[in-house]
Amino acid sequence: MPHYITLVKWTDQGIRTVKDSPKRAEAFRREVEKVGGKVQIFFTLGEYDIVAATEAPSDEVYLRLSLWLGSLGNVRTTTLKAWPEADAAKVIAQLP
């Protein structure tokens, strides 16, 4: 299953309603699980407010989740497609 790392920053709206962020994180988790995925969510210090590590069935499914999340207006995201170390090692082993 494809993996995605999402770097999240609160919008002005999101930080004004920061007390609701645990509920919003849980809502995102439920949406991910509905499509057969998994997610780990970390609240962070530094440039990003939240980092999520998500598994989703496909890029298209993750795109739909990401667009839904952004449309709520509480966060802006930057997503990185990721490969687990073992999967990356298989690809690297095929290099000429």
Image (cartoon, rainbow, N blue to C red):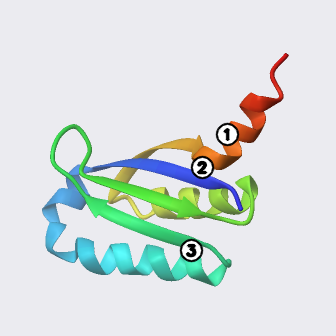
Residue 86's place in the image compared with 30, above or below, is above
The span from disc 1 to disc 3 (Cα, nearest Å) is 24 Å
Q: Number of callouts in the render?
A: 3
Relative horizontal placement of residue 63, taking residue 13 as reference (left or right): right
Residue 83 in view, yes or no: no
The quadrant the N terminus occupies is bottom right
The quadrant the C terminus occupies is top right
Asked whether 8 or 57 is in front, the reply is: 57
Residue 6's place in the image compared with 65, above or below, is above
Q: Which residue is mark 3?
A: 32
The span from disc 2 to disc 3 (Cα, nearest Å) is 19 Å
- Give coordinates of residue 22: x percent, y percent: 25, 76
Asked if the residues shown at circle 2 and circle 1 are in contact, with their CB atoms under 8 angstroms apart, the answer is: yes
Instruction: Tell which circle, 2 or 3, labels the residue nearer the N-terminal end.
Output: 3
Residue 59 in view, yes or no: yes
Q: Amino acid at mark 3?
A: Val
Relative horizontal placement of residue 95, taking residue 36 as reference (left or right): right
Question: Which mark is on residue 88?
Answer: 1
Q: Amino acid at mark 2?
A: Pro
